Image (cartoon, grey):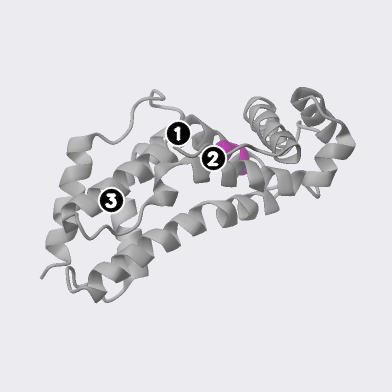
Amino acid sequence: MEITTLSRSEQKRQQIIVAATTLFMEKGFIHTSMDQVAKLAGVSKQTVYSHFQDKNNLFVETITAHCSSSNLRKEMYRSEQTVSQNLLRIVTSFVGLVFSPEALRVFDICVVHKEDYPELGALFFEAAPRIVLEQIEACLAELDEKKLLRVDNPQFATFQLLGMVQGDWKMRHALGVVKANDVPTQAYLEDCVDRFIKAYSE
């Protein structure tokens, strides 16, 4: 197995992202400073700014790093799997990402600051949700192209699939009326996929 060794600069970049993620999760965006990030990362403030233009840029990078570590960013259509297996794999990874403690916390931070810091929500959307939506939309378009499903509007179908998958769990998490590990079950996801395939096979 090939082992990739990070350069000194790449190691420091990772240290900064890890430190920033910890602070954003604990203190929120507004109350996290670049000085605090530098101290926790064990690097100079100058080093932080040499990697990240400002706190906004660093916030986006922490989100991107979390999404990149998720299986969802690696999910594409696999010809050796059935339509059902492909979709179930994708929605399972989607739920794992969306309902992760980090994603839920970032969502809460953006909502809390939507009035005094509206650009925060836009940064979050561009760094994660938009990319995820486009990726799943591309997969559905490929299923249509291969005539495995009849998806005339992949974007519309993506909204339907993900909306059904999230159910009311996302709203209840936002309101704080569920436990952290209360997420859509595998049986529920399987049922969603079955219903979606039935709707787009007719």
Labels 3 & 2 near each other (Cβ < 8 A): no
Q: Earlier in the sequence, mark 2 or mark 1?
A: 2
Which of the two residues, 80 or 133, is positioned nearer the viewer here? 80
- Using a 10 Å C-alpha cutoff, classify the residue at mark 3 as few (fewer than 14 neighbours), some (14 to 19) or many (20 or more): some
Amino acid marked by disc 2: His
Would you name the residue on which mark 1 appears? Answer: 100
Labels 2 & 1 near each other (Cβ < 8 A): yes
Would you name the residue on which mark 2 appears? Answer: 66
Q: Is residue 177 above or below residue 198?
A: above
Which dot, 1 or 3, sits closer to the camera? 1
Labels 1 & 3 near each other (Cβ < 8 A): no
Q: CA distance from mark 2 to mark 1?
A: 10 Å
Q: Earlier in the sequence, mark 3 or mark 2?
A: 2
If the image is split into quadrants, where does the C terminus sit?
Answer: bottom left
Could you tell me residue 59's position as x and y percent? Answer: 68, 43
Please check the rendered image and state whether residue 109 is part of the magenta-colored stretch, yes or no: yes
Residue positioned most to the front:
1
Would you name the residue on which mark 3 appears? Answer: 164
Residue at 21%, 73% (x, y): give it. Answer: 146
Q: Earlier in the sequence, mark 1 or mark 3?
A: 1
Q: Which residues are magenta?
A: 106-110
User: Magenta: predominant secondary structure element?
Assistant: helix
Could you tell me residue 95's position as x and y percent? Answer: 36, 41
